[in-house]
Image (cartoon, rainbow, N blue to C red):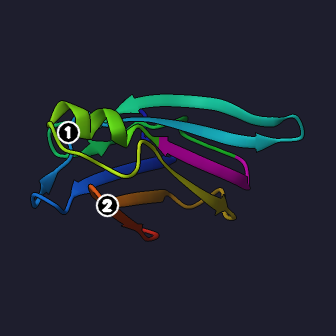
């Protein structure tokens, strides 16, 4: 399998485990709005290792996570039915890892490696 330019990892900090089964969509900003590039679902370790192609151009991208569906499946009330993280890909030669730390009423993120 060819490595993806974008990867993500979702951790459920409310229960201290990886968040498996979270659907996510990668989109690119274009002159006409947002264009879908790839869809994925986190594995048992909370990771999507192949979210998108091997190479992307510099630009603005976003990942939308379907957190409401994840929490509904675990019978957990949440304030966030979806989380959208928008970021700039500035160097097409680099790999971009976008982690999401998630709980029912808060989330955070950072530029991963």
Relative side of 47 to 5, left or right: left
Q: Earlier in the sequence, mark 1 or mark 2?
A: 1
Q: Which residue is mark 1?
A: 20
Q: Residue at x 18, y 44 (%)?
A: 76
Residue 2 position within the rendered picture, expressed as x and y whole percent measured from the top left: 43, 34
The image shows residue 56 at horizontal and vertical percentages of 65, 44
Residue drawn at (36%, 58%) of the image: 100
Report the residue marked by disc 2: 105
Residue 63 included in the magenta stretch of the image: yes
Task: Say whether residue 50 is magenta.
Answer: no
Q: Residues within 10 Å of mark 1 (few under 14, many from 20)?
A: some
Q: Is residue 16 above or below residue 44?
A: below
Looking at the rendered structure, the secondary structure element under dot 2 is loop
Task: Give coordinates of residue 68: x percent, y percent.
Answer: 35, 39
Vertical order, 39 against 62 (above or below): above
Q: Which residues are magenta?
A: 57-64
Q: Position of residue 55 (x, y in %)?
A: 60, 43
């Amino acid at each position: 399998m060819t490595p993806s330019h974008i990867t993500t990892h979702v951790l459920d900090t409310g229960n201290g485990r990886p968040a498996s089964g979270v659907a996510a969509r990668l989109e690119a900003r274009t002159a006409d709005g947002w264009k879908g590039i790839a869809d994925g679902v986190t594995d048992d370790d909370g990771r999507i290792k192949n979210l998108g192609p091997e190479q992307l151009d510099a630009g603005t991208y976003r990942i939308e996570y379907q957190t409401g569906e994840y929490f509904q499946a675990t019978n957990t009330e949440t304030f966030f039915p979806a989380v959208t993280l928008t970021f700039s890909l500035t160097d097409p030669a680099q790999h971009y890892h976008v982690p999401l730390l998630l709980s029912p009423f808060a989330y955070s993120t950072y530029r991963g490696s």
